[in-house]
């Protein structure tokens, strides 16, 4: 399986590409913004492709072309300018979804925010709510497509070493999760059809990742 | 016909409420953010209702309740903070659409931007494109509902006195249009069923507004 990782140069993206490259039968294509980001991916044996999420759908479609699945883990982050929030987290995501459809690729894994419901928008602080709105509409857009989607809602991300154990569900208690574990959850979601058409929250817990995902 | 004007205190909104109040058989409900904005509307005989577009759908539904049509002409404007662009121009619009559905009201007139296509997003300057993205998704959301919608795409807005003559069409040459004429176009759209399920660009031209709208 050939997987396009959109946002490959992000903290989750880098770990995901490494995991993909170390797994038999999987191959990563790393969508990055700048030529100078490519060496990390080349060293892993992954194929870097330079496309900016502010480019048009056609440009993104060229990156999607020929892969079996797309993972969207790009993010302007909640602390960038709010112009980037709408251009990357919302419009960049939707363009990637549209490019995936155009390229005839069916499988799409979205890395979302912990809670992107309308209730979460209203409950968010003024500085965070634009990010939640952007993620809300990106998720909504994806759910209204015919794509074989999975939407992952991780808890507060940390840079801790992965523990490989999680709590998973439509609704779980707010908590933390290492980015490394999120990368593993993405990888296993790609390989488990039970995740298709589903969205789930995930935080560190007591269940091994493979069992947790298999319980969906 | 009782019409809720969302964004009543804006430059188009104020003229629209006045026009509605001066027309036989029409009555305006003016949705505004602050108590101190209400005197203008009371003097016109319109009913002011205080709801903030950052409130939840339920709050907006209370404003929609009992009217026959909703006009969305609120806007953070292209020059406010980009957080307001996503919270008002996108999420405020979608919440108003959802509130309209919940209240069982069918008619919805959206005042959009001149060109909200994907091509227009790509062609926009970096400072303007977040606004176009927000309007794009609000329009898309509306088109995917069962509401009897009209989407009006006015050219560059001026404060000139209305001339009452326009050019109208799916695609017209870029140009200007006085806000007063936009208000008149909204009013006549509300009263002409030919505008239902349609969107059109409008700039100053040679055709009387009523004939132009009737030609749709």
Image (cartoon, coloured by chain):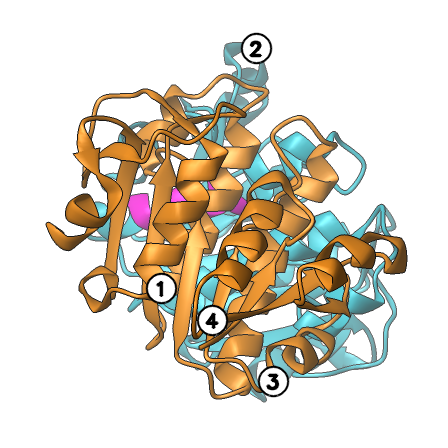
Chain colours: A orange, B cyan
Q: Nearer the viewer, mark 2 or mark 4?
A: 4
- Mark 1: few, some, or many residues within 10 Å (few <14, many ≥20)? many
Chain that bears disc 1: A
Q: Nearer the viewer, mark 3 or mark 2?
A: 3
Name the mark on residue A190.
Answer: 1
Question: What residue is shown with label 2?
Answer: B36
The alpha-carbon separation of the residues under discs 4 and 3 comes to 16 Å
The alpha-carbon separation of the residues under discs 3 and 2 comes to 56 Å
Q: Position of residue B150 (x, y in %)?
A: 48, 68
At a point 29% along the width and 52% down the height, the residue shown is B68
Question: What residue is shown with label 4?
Answer: A26
The alpha-carbon separation of the residues under discs 4 and 1 comes to 10 Å
**Number of on-image labels:** 4
- Mark 4: few, some, or many residues within 10 Å (few <14, many ≥20)? some
Chain that bears disc 2: B
Callout 3 secondary element? loop
Q: Position of residue B171 (x, y in %)?
A: 72, 83
The residue segment tinted magenta is B90-99
Q: Earlier in the sequence, mark 3 or mark 1?
A: 3
Callout 1 secondary element? helix
Q: Is residue B98 left or right of residue A80?
A: left
Residues beneath discs 4 and 3 located on the same chain:
yes
The alpha-carbon separation of the residues under discs 3 and 1 comes to 18 Å
- Mark 3: few, some, or many residues within 10 Å (few <14, many ≥20)? some
- Mark 2: few, some, or many residues within 10 Å (few <14, many ≥20)? few
The alpha-carbon separation of the residues under discs 2 and 1 comes to 55 Å
Farthest residue to the top: give it.
B36
At a point 17% along the width and 34% down the height, the residue shown is A207
Q: Position of residue B130 (x, y in %)?
A: 72, 48
Q: Earlier in the sequence, mark 4 or mark 3?
A: 4
Q: Nearer the viewer, mark 4 or mark 1?
A: 4
């Amino acid at each position: 399986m050939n997987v396009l990782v959109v946002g490959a140069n992000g903290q989750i993206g880098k770990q995901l590409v490494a995991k993909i490259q170390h797994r038999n039968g999987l191959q990563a294509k790393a969508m990055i913004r700048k030529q100078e980001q490519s060496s990390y991916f080349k060293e892993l044996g992954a194929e870097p492709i330079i496309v900016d999420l502010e480019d048009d759908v056609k440009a993104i479609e060229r990156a999607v072309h020929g892969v079996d699945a797309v993972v969207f883990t790009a993010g302007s982050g909640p602390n960038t300018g709010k112009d980037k929030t709408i251009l990357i987290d919302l419009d960049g995501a939707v363009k990637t979804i549209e490019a995936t459809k155009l390229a005839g690729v069916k499988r799409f894994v979205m890395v979302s925010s912990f809670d992107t419901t309308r209730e979460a928008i209203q409950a968010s602080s003024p500085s965070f709510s634009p990010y939640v709105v952007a993620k809300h509409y990106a998720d909504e857009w994806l759910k209204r497509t015919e794509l074989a989607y999975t939407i992952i809602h991780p808890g507060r991300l940390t840079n801790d070493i992965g523990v490989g154990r999680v709590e998973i569900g439509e609704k779980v208690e707010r908590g933390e999760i290492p980015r490394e574990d999120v990368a593993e959850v993405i990888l296993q979601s790609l390989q488990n059809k039970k995740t298709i058409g589903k969205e789930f929250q995930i935080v560190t817990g007591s269940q091994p990742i493979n069992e947790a995902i298999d319980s969906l």
